[in-house]
Image (tube, rainbow, N blue to C red):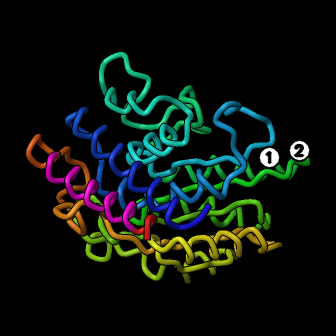
Amino acid sequence: MNNLELQKHANDVRKGIVTAVHSAKAGHPGGSLSATDIYTYLYFEEMNIDPKNPDKDDRDRFVLSKGHTAPGLYSTLANRGFFPVEDLKTLRHLGSYLQGHPCIHIPGVDMSSGSLGQGVSAAVGMALGARMGGKDFRVYTLLGDGEIEEGQVWEAAMFAGHRKLDNLCVIVDNNNLQIDGPIDQVCSPYPIDKKFEAFNFHVINVDAHDFDAIRAAFKEARETKGMPTCIVAHSLKGKGVSFMENSVDWHGKAPNDDEYAVAMADLEKIGAELEKAGEA
């Protein structure tokens, strides 16, 4: 898939995120939008998955460790064909299967998650289980940079590095903002790359919004043997929506009707520019 196609898919995913959170009148748009290009690359190009057979045995696994950004995962799954895009409007509604954190009963979701620090441990267990069972699938997990202030993350990293789980790829969405402010002011986990290296990870720093760089990073991760990989994805919180970009206020808040209109106008403009680029 070429970069323009990926950019179009990512823009559709961002529209789904904003629509879902607006409809719910709650949720976490900022960190969903910052990770959208990573989600898009994983589900539209990188991972061995089949929306028509979401539970196939040899599929690659994905664990959203920063489970509060479920709108990003849900919109990606919907746009990839796991369930109807229209269902995104039911986010957090009574009776909806799309609640505030991922649940394993949702098509395409491999692990219930949301209690920060725990998802990566499940991913490590999946990677070890694959090795012990002679399976060749890969396991991917996405963490928030604020989330890695949790001690359990480093227990999991120590185990993965010690076990040389080269079928595991940890991605850190490094947008530098968490609910209370910049991570380097709240409880700095920097330098992220050096910390993972100390736990025997191969580490790649990447621009989280550059599909060429993302593609190269995941290729390098696949080719790395004898150790797990951590991709530190340097991203912009709220990416694609002008008033949400790099604003801590949009960590966990839904846009009102007027803000929703502005956000969708921003994304429609990006979509029009991408269509024009495709015609050139």
274 sits left or right of 227 in the view = left
Range drawn in magenta: 261-276
Residue found 22% across the figure and 58% down from its top: 266
Question: Is label 2 in contact with label 1 (beta carbons under 8 Å)?
Answer: yes
164 sits left or right of 170 in the view = right
Residue found 89% across the figure and 44% down from its top: 133
Quadrant of the frame with the C terminus: bottom left
What distance separates the C-alpha of mark 2 from that of mark 1? 6 Å
214 sits left or right of 258 in the view = right
How many labels, in total? 2
Q: Which mark is residue 95?
A: none
**Image quarter of residue 23:** top left
Dominant SS type (magenta): helix
Residue found 42% across the figure and 33% down from its top: 85
To which residue does mark 2 refer? Answer: 133
Q: Considering depth in this image, is 205 or 189 the residue closer to the camera?
A: 205
Q: Considering depth in this image, is 205 or 122 the residue closer to the camera?
A: 205
Secondary structure found at label 2: loop
Outermost residue, left direction? Answer: 258
The percent coordinates of residue 159 (x first, y second) are 70, 62
253 sits left or right of 35 in the view = left
To which residue does mark 1 refer? Answer: 129
